[in-house]
Image: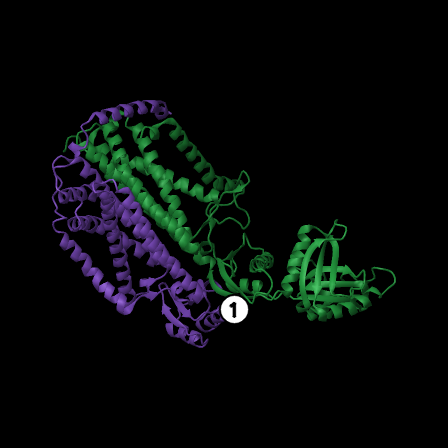
Chain colours: A green, B purple
C-alpha cells in the first residue's frame, strides 16, 4: 500500500482533479462567454468545445426526445452481395435523413439485414416518411413553352419521358477512358435501351449547334408532373441539386447517340460526387423493401422531465449519503465525502470527453453507483474501528484496515465488473448505457474510495488534533 | 498550501506505521475471543431458510401458474403514453382506441396519463391512432404522445434471449471467479467451489425472490409496476452483482479468520465472520437504499418498476448474504467435508 501513498499517485490524482474541473467548468465558461443563462438549455448546434473536441453530455433519445427506428430490409436483389446492399442502403438513408437537418443523426447496421436509425427531436412518423420515401429516378427532356420565364432555359420546360427507374439495372462511378475525370455509368435493360436509343437519337439531332436546350437530358429524383405544371413558380426550388433540397440529379448535354442502353454521364465530378450520384441513382431502382420492426418515440418534454427528475434524485441521494457518512464516521466520513465529490466530477468529465451517449437507465446506473461508491470506504472504516479497538495506533489502524479490506474490495468490484461487461455485450440499446455507466462508476469509485480517501486520511491524520477519539474518528481508544 | 507542505511527513508517519504493524503478532488480537458473537445465525439457520422459503415458494407457484405480466419489449406490439391537456375519462380513450381496430387495451397511468397497447403499428399507423385519440379525447399535452414504443415479435425474442443469456453467463462467470479466488482455502478447488456455490445459491435466492414478488404483483394483484421488461432484467443483474458483493465480504472474512484461528470450529468461524461484517453490509445497503428511495420518489414513471426491483433485490441481497450464504456454506461443508 506504500505505492498508493507515493507522490506519483498523488500527482496523478491531482492531475485528474484538474482535468475534471477544467472539463466540467468549460461549459460554464462557455455559457458566460456567449451570454447564455445557466438555467436555459443550450441553443441547437452550439455545444461547448475545448481544444477542438466536444465537452458536453450527449443525451440519449430518451432524454433529449426523438425517435429510434429499427428497419428490416427484405427482397434483396439476387446476384448482389447482401453486405453491399446493406451498406449502400445505409448511405441512402443517411442522405435522406440529412435533408432533415438533425443534430448528429445515427444510422448503423444491425446484423445482416437491419438498420438502426436514431434521430433527435424528430417523431417516428416523420422519420419513417423521410426514410421510406420512394426516390424515383425521372428522366426528362426539354420542350418549348413560351410561357416559361424562369429556370435554366427560359422558354422551355421539362417533359417526363417513358424511361423509368425500374429499367435501370445499375449505376456506378468510374474514371473515364483517359483516366482523368470521374463519370457515372448507367446501364438500362433492353426495354430501357430501346427507349434511350430513340430519345438520344432525337436529342442528338435536335440542333446543329451543340448545347441548345433540346439537347439536354435531365435526371431528377421524384420530379412530379405537378411540378412541371407549375414550373414558373416552383422551378427555382426544384431545379436545385438534390442534396440542397431540390430534385435535380444531373442536367447534361447528349453528346452522342446511345444505342446499347449504356449511358455515361460526364460533368465536373469528383470521386465523391460521382459515387454519391451512383448511389442515389441505384437507389431509385433498388428493389429492397424497408419495414419498421421496432421504434421508440419520446417526446422532448418527457425527456426533459426525466433529466430534471434524475438530477433531483441524484442530488438528494448524494446529500443523504454525505450526511450519513459524516454522522457515522466523522472525520473519515467527511474525507470520504470529499472523495465522493471528486468521484462525481471525474465521472462527469469522463462522460463529457468520451462523448458517449447517456440514456435514462444510464443516469440511473450513475446515481446507483453514488450509493455504491462509498462501499469500499465503509468496509475500510469498519475495519479501522475494529483495528483501533484492538489497540493499534491510529496510523497503524488505517494501514491495516486498508490492507485487510483490500481483498474483499477487489473481489466484490471484480464481480460487479464481470456483470457489467456481460450486460454490455449481451443486452441491447439503453441497457448497454446502464452497463457502461455502471462500469465507469465502479472503476472511478475504486480510485476515489481507495486512493483518494486513503491519501486524504494520511495527510489529515498528521495533525494531532484529528486523532483525538470519538468526536473525530467515531471510535474511542481502548473500548475493546 | 499548509497541507501540501506537510505531505512528505505523512509518507514518513505511515511508513513507520507499517513497520510497527508488521512487527505485531498479527490478527490474533482482532479475533481474540468471540466477543461479538451475540447472535447465533449459523445455529438458527433453519429459521432463516424458512423465512426465505415462505416468500419464494408462493411466488414460484404464482410464476408457474400465472407467469408474468410482460412489458412491451418482451411481448411485442405498440405502446402509447398519452397525456391530455384537460382531464379525459377512461371511456373516452377506450372508445377512440376501439374505433381504430388495432386490438387496443387502455390502462390508466399516474398523473392523468393513459397507456394504450395495440398490435404492431408502423409509425404511420401510430400517427393515425394518435390523431384519432387526440380528436376524440381532446388535445394532447405537447401535441403528441409522451412516448410511443413499437417492438416487433422478432425484436422481442432477441431481447428476451439476450437478457436470459446475460443472467446465465454472469452467474457462471461469478461462480468460476469465486472458485478461483477461494481455491487457496484449506480444501483447494473443492472448497473454492463450496464458497462459489454457496454464493451462487444465495444469488439465485435473490433472483427467485425478486421474480416471485414481481410475478405476484403483476399477475396476482394486477399492478402495472410488476411488469417484466428488459429494464427489470437489468435490475436483476445489478442485484446479482450487489448480492455477490455482500457475500464476498463475508466469505473473505471467513477466509481470513480460518487462517488465523485454529481454536474455533468451522461453524464458529463462520458465525464470527458474519457478525464482524454484518454492520458493513447493512450500512452499505442502507446508503444504496436511501439513494434508491430518492430515485423512487423523484424519478420518472418509466423508472419506477426498475427502481422498485433494485430496492427489493438489494434488501434481499443483504439478507441472503448474512442469513443464507454462510449458513449454506456450513451445511455444504457437513455434507461434503474437506479433509
> Residue at (19%, 59%) from the top-left corner?
B53
Quarter of the image with the C terminus of chain A in it:
top left
Q: Which of the chains bears the disc numbered 1? A: B
In front: B306, or A435?
A435
Secondary structure of residue under mark 1: helix
Q: Residue furthest right?
A: A208
x and y, in percent, of residue A192 in the image: 72, 69
Q: Nearer the viewer, residue A79 or A124?
A: A79
Residue at the spot x=42%, y=43% of the render? A348
Residue at x 36% of width, y 37% of height? A447
Q: Quadrant of the N terminus of chain A?
A: top left
Residue A410 falls in image quadrant: top left
| Most distant residue in the front direction | B339
Residue B133, percent from left and from top: 45, 71
Res. B102 image quadrant: bottom left
Q: Is residue A244 visible?
A: no
Count of picture labels: 1
The residue where tag 1 is placed is B124
Looking at the image, residue B51 sits to the left or right of residue B94; the answer is left
Q: Quadrant of residue B60?
A: bottom left
Given residues A347 and A329, the one toward you in this image is: A347
Query: Which residue: 21% across, 27% down?
Result: A393
Q: Position of residue A401 (x, y in %)?
A: 25, 34
Residue B275 showing in the rendered view? yes
Estimate the x, y position of residue B103 in percent, counting from the top left.
42, 74
Amino acid at each position: 500500500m506504500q505505492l498508493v501513498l507515493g507522490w506519483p499517485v498523488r500527482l496523478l490524482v491531482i492531475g485528474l482533479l484538474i482535468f475534471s474541473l477544467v472539463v466540467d467548468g468549460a461549459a460554464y465558461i462557455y455559457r458566460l462567454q456567449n451570454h447564455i443563462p445557466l438555467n436555459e438549455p443550450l441553443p441547437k448546434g452550439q455545444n461547448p468545445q475545448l481544444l477542438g473536441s466536444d465537452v458536453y453530455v450527449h443525451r440519449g433519445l430518451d432524454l433529449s426526445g426523438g425517435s429510434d427506428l429499427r428497419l428490416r430490409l427484405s427482397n434483396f436483389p439476387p446476384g448482389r452481395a447482401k453486405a453491399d446492399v446493406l451498406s449502400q442502403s445505409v448511405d441512402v438513408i443517411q442522405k435522406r435523413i440529412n435533408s432533415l437537418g438533425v443534430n448528429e443523426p445515427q444510422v448503423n447496421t444491425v446484423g445482416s439485414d437491419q438498420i438502426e436509425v436514431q434521430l433527435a427531436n424528430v417523431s417516428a412518423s416523420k422519420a419513417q416518411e423521410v426514410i421510406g420515401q420512394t426516390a424515383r429516378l425521372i428522366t426528362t427532356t426539354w420542350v418549348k413553352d413560351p410561357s416559361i420565364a424562369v429556370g435554366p432555359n427560359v422558354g422551355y420546360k421539362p417533359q417526363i419521358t417513358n424511361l423509368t427507374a425500374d429499367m435501370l439495372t445499375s449505376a456506378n462511378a468510374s474514371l473515364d477512358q483517359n483516366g482523368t475525370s470521374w463519370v457515372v455509368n448507367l446501364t438500362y435493360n433492353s426495354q430501357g435501351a430501346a427507349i434511350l436509343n430513340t430519345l438520344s437519337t432525337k436529342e442528338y439531332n435536335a440542333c446543329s449547334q451543340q448545347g441548345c436546350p433540346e439537347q439536354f437530358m435531365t435526371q431528377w429524383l421524384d420530379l412530379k408532373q405537378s411540378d412541371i405544371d407549375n414550373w414558373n413558380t416552383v422551378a427555382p426550388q426544384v431545379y436545385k441539386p438534390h442534396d440542397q433540397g431540390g430534385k435535380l440529379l444531373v442536367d447534361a448535354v447528349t453528346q452522342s447517340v446511345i444505342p446499347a442502353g449504356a449511358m455515361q454521364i460526364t460533368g465536373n465530378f469528383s470521386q465523391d460526387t460521382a459515387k454519391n450520384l451512383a448511389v442515389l441513382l441505384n437507389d431509385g431502382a433498388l428493389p429492397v423493401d424497408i419495414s419498421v420492426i421496432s421504434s421508440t418515440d419520446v417526446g422532448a418534454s418527457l425527456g426533459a422531465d426525466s433529466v430534471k427528475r434524475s438530477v433531483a434524485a441524484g442530488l438528494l441521494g448524494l446529500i443523504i449519503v454525505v450526511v450519513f457518512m459524516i454522522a457515522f464516521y466523522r472525520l473519515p466520513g467527511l474525507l470520504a465525502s470529499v472523495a465522493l465529490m471528486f468521484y462525481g466530477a471525474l465521472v462527469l468529465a469522463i462522460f463529457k470527453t468520451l462523448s458517449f451517449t447517456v440514456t435514462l437507465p444510464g443516469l440511473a446506473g450513475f446515481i446507483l453507483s453514488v450509493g455504491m461508491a462509498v462501499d469500499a470506504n465503509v468496509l475500510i472504516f469498519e475495519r479501522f474501528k475494529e483495528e483501533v479497538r484492538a489497540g493499534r495506533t491510529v496510523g497503524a489502524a488505517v494501514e491495516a484496515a486498508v490492507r485487510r479490506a483490500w481483498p474483499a474490495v477487489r473481489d466484490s468490484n471484480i464481480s460487479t465488473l464481470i456483470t457489467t461487461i456481460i450486460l454490455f455485450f449481451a443486452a441491447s440499446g439503453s441497457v448497454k448505457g446502464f452497463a457502461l455507466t455502471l462500469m465507469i462508476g465502479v472503476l472511478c469509485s475504486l480510485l476515489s474510495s481507495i486512493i483518494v480517501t486513503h491519501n486524504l486520511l494520511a495527510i489529515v491524520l498528521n495533525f494531532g488534533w484529528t486523532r483525538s477519539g470519538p468526536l473525530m474518528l467515531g471510535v474511542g481508544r481502548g473500548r475493546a | 498550501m499548509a497541507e501540501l507542505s506537510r505531505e512528505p511527513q505523512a509518507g514518513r508517519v505511515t511508513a513507520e506505521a507499517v513497520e510497527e504493524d508488521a512487527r505485531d503478532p498479527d490478527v490474533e488480537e482482532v479475533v481474540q475471543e468471540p466477543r461479538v458473537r451475540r447472535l447465533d445465525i449459523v445455529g438458527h439457520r433453519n429459521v432463516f431458510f424458512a423465512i426465505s422459503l415462505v416468500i419464494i415458494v408462493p411466488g414460484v407457484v404464482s410464476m408457474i401458474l400465472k407467469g408474468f405480466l410482460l412489458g412491451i419489449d418482451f411481448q411485442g406490439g405498440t405502446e402509447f403514453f398519452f397525456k391530455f391537456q384537460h382531464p379525459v375519462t377512461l371511456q373516452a380513450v377506450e372508445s377512440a382506441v376501439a374505433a381504430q381496430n388495432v386490438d387496443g387495451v387502455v390502462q390508466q397511468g399516474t398523473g392523468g396519463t393513459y397507456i394504450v397497447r395495440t398490435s404492431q403499428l408502423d409509425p404511420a399507423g401510430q400517427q393515425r391512432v394518435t390523431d384519432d385519440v387526440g380528436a376524440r379525447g381532446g388535445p394532447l399535452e405537447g401535441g403528441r404522445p409522451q412516448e410511443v414504443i413499437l417492438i416487433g415479435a422478432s425484436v422481442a425474442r432477441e431481447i428476451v434471449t439476450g437478457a436470459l443469456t446475460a443472467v446465465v453467463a454472469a452467474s457462471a462467470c461469478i461462480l468460476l471467479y469465486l472458485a478461483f479466488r477461494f481455491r487457496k482455502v484449506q480444501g483447494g478447488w473443492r472448497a473454492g467451489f463450496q464458497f462459489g456455490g454457496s454464493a451462487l445459491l444465495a444469488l439465485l435466492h435473490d433472483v427467485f425472490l425478486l421474480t416471485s414478488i414481481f410475478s405476484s404483483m403483476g399477475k396476482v394483484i394486477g399492478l402495472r409496476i410488476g411488469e417484466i421488461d428488459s429494464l427489470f432484467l437489468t435490475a436483476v443483474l445489478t442485484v446479482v452483482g450487489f448480492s455477490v458483493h455482500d457475500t464476498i465480504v463475508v466469505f473473505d472474512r471467513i477466509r481470513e479468520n480460518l487462517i488465523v484461528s485454529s481454536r474455533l470450529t468451522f461453524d464458529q468461524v463462520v458465525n464470527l465472520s458474519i457478525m464482524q461484517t454484518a454492520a458493513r453490509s447493512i450500512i452499505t445497503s442502507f446508503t444504496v437504499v436511501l439513494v434508491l428511495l430518492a430515485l423512487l420518489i423523484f424519478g420518472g414513471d418509466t423508472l419506477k418498476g426498475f427502481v422498485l426491483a433494485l430496492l427489493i433485490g438489494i434488501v434481499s441481497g443483504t439478507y441472503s448474504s448474512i442469513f443464507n450464504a454462510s449458513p449454506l456454506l456450513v451445511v455444504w461443508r457437513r455434507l461434503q467435508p474437506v479433509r
